[in-house]
Each structure stands twice: as C-alpha cells, then as structure tokens.
Image: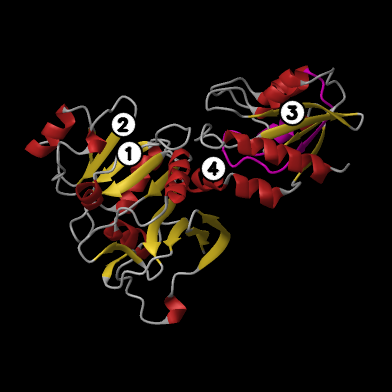
C-alpha cells in the first residue's frame, strides 16, 4: 500500500464530519503500523477531539513507531482542545503524512516544524488538491477572512424561479427540498431578502435531514418585515439576525430587537440598500465561515454583480412556465466575453430534477 491509498481512506473518514464541525475543517486520520491499519478517526463535532486524537484513542494496538496519515496539518496551539502535536509526540508516532498544510495563522506550517524538530519523519502534499477541495470553505475563510458564499435557487427549465404572479411553491421536487435542507445544515448561516420572507414566509431551518440549524440572516434595509414572520419566531433553536440600514434610534429597530431578534446596522450601498460586502465582512468577523443564499432574485443578482459568490447550486425542474420571474436580473453584461464564468463540479439527479453544483471562476 502507498501513501495515497491511506490518504484516500483518511479523506473518506473526514467527510463524516459534514455539517457538524464548522467553522473547523473536516479532518480524517488513519494510523498504520507494519502495513496494517490499527487506528481510524475523524473530527466529529466542533469543540470535540480532533481526528488525530480520535485515531489514537481508537487504535487497536500500540501506536509507537507507526505512521499517522491526516488530511490536514496537525494543530500546535491550544484551542477548544489541546494541541494534537503533543499527543503525537507522547504516543511516539514516528512518521506523519499530511495532505496539506493548515491556512490558520495559528498553525500554518508550525505544526509540521514542531514535529520535524522533534525527530519525526514528515511528508506533506499527498493528495493536496483533494484535501483542499474537501475544506474549500475553511481555506477560503482562513485566507480571506470572508465567508464562503453559496447561491442556491430552484428554477424551471426556461429559467424562472416563479410565475409572473410570484407563485413559486413548489418548483422543485421533494427530493430536491431534502437536498436543500442538507445544504442548509452544512452552512453556518442562511441568508434571504425581506421580499422572500414576505412572499414565502419560510422557516429557513433544517427539518428534512439531521443537522444543526444555521444562523438565519434576513436582509431588510427598511425594517418592514412582518413581526409574525416565521424567521422571527423560536430564537432558541434557530436564531435570526436582521441586517438593516436603519439605526438603533429607529422605532422599528427597537421593536424587533425587543422581541429577542438581533438587529444590526450595515452601511448602505449606492442604492440605499444593505451593502452585502459589508454585511459579509461583519459575518466573517463573527466566525461565520459560510453563508447559503436562498433568495430572492434581487439578492442573487446583487451578489453575482459584485462578484461575491463562490459557489452556485442550481436546481432545474422539468417545467416550462413562460413569462415569469428570472433567477438572475440585470448584470450589465453587454458581450459574451464579459459573461460570468463557472465551472461545473457535479451534476446529479434528485427526483425529477437536475442539480448543477458549480464554482464561479
């Protein structure tokens, strides 16, 4: 067996942490001794043991002299848990193979150097592309300070997210709705505009799959949201943050805040609406590493126009409705050379629908 083989196993383990470890990265670890796997582990939840520690704890034998395969450089700082490098040294592991170095400035290459200086054999960059892709959200957040932005919408084959009268429930199938709920569980926050709240009155919670509820972020520049909106209810299990251009002196600001919902003032853009880049900067400072945008068309268009989106998830239903509401509005693109370019990463079928998972490039 070679290093790549064991790293593939570690990657498979890491994927089990999906939806539970953010803002930490998903990490998997495998311990090999005498060409035999004696330990496996992965980071199971935020604040819990890291993958290396779980692999050591789960080992079916003495790990002294073994090789540790881990998808991300072992940490060397005190966080929610003690440094993983200390456990590696204590258990006398002889060799560490890391898929990629950690972009966290508290770790970056320091864990590798710490182990090297104590005589361990170190190898990095094994399946590095795959390891970075697994944690694209984490790396983006660590390297930019901004949350990774996913735009998701369901449309008909002719590109409509609603009929001309505004009816949109339900364009996609039940299977696609379940997929959407899984997507919600994988993000730290879910964002929608006040128009979507008024029209659909969504809960924006995770119900059709197991997973935690993300922070609900509602963009409402003028604070005209109905106090009866579902997103303003049940703050204990699914908290909501309302972003507005109004200040604390506004009576509407005070009324919503008094109900237990957090309201923040964000600077306005040139049109008088909440400046989305400023909002994302605020969320990043709050350790929100990923945001799922579920509408409406005005928010989607603004995010794309300002080049703030990283990922695009499009659910295409086998329906044609003709004139209706477009998913994406005016982007001021006048020639094809200026078109937004995307890279298809995955195309899957859910129920009757086709889901295209792509990245903006």
The boundaries of the magenta stretch are 91-114
- Of residues 235 and 34, which is closer to you in this image? 235
Looking at marks 3 and 1 on the same chain, the residue that comes earlier in the sequence is marked by 3
Across and down, in percent, residue 354 comes to 50, 60
**In 3D space, how far apart are the residues under numbered discs 4 and 2 (Cα atoms)?**
23 Å
- Judging depth in this view, the residue of 236 and 88 nearest the camera is 236
Q: Residue at x 57, y 22 (%)?
A: 48
Crowd band around label 4 with a 10 angstrom C-alpha radius: few (<14), some (14–19), many (20+): many
Task: Identify the element where label 1 is drawn.
Answer: strand
User: Which quarter shows the N terminus?
Assistant: top right
**Up-down: is 46 above or below 250?**
above
Secondary structure at numbered mark 3 = strand
210 left or right of 264 in image = right
Q: CA distance from mark 4 to mark 1?
A: 20 Å
- Spatial separation of the CA atoms under disc 3 and disc 1: 35 Å
**Horizontal side of residue 5 vs 49, given as left or right:** right
């Amino acid at each position: 067996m070679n290093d790549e083989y064991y790293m593939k196993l570690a990657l498979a383990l890491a994927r089990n942490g999906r939806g539970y470890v953010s803002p930490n990265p998903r990490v998997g670890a495998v311990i090999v001794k005498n060409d035999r796997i004696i330990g496996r582990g992965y980071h199971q939840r935020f604040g819990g043991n890291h993958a290396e520690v779980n692999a050591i704890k789960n080992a079916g034998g003495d790990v002294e002299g073994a090789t540790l395969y881990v998808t991300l450089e072992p940490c060397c700082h005190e966080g929610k848990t003690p440094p993983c490098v200390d456990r590696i040294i204590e258990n006398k592991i002889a060799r560490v193979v890391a898929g990629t170095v950690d972009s966290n400035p508290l770790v970056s290459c320091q864990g590798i150097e710490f182990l090297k200086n104590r005589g361990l054999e170190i190898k990095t960059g094994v399946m590095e592309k795959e390891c970075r892709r697994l944690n694209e959200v984490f790396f983006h957040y660590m390297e930019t300070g901004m949350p990774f932005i996913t735009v998701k919408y369901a449309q008909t084959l002719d590109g409509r997210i609603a009929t001309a009268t505004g009816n949109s429930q339900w364009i996609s199938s039940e299977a696609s709705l379940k997929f959407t709920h899984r997507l919600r569980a994988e993000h730290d926050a879910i964002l929608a505009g006040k128009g979507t709240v008024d029209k659909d009155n969504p809960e924006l919670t995770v119900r059709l799959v197991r997973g935690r509820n993300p922070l609900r972020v509602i963009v409402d520049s003028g604070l005209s949201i109905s106090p009866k909106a579902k997103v303003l209810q049940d703050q204990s299990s699914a908290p909501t943050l309302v972003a507005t251009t109004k200040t604390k002196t506004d009576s509407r600001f005070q009324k919503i805040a008094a109900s237990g919902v957090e309201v923040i003032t964000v600077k306005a853009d040139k049109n008088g609406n909440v400046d989305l880049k400023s909002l994302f900067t605020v969320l990043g400072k709050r350790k929100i590493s990923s945001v799922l945008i579920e509408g409406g068309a005005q928010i989607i268009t603004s995010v794309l126009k300002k080049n703030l989106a990283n990922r695009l998830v499009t659910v295409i239903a086998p329906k044609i409705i003709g004139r209706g509401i477009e998913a994406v509005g005016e982007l001021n693109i006048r020639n094809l050379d200026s078109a937004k370019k995307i890279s298809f990463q995955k195309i899957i079928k859910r129920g009757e629908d086709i889901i295209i998972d792509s990245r903006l490039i």
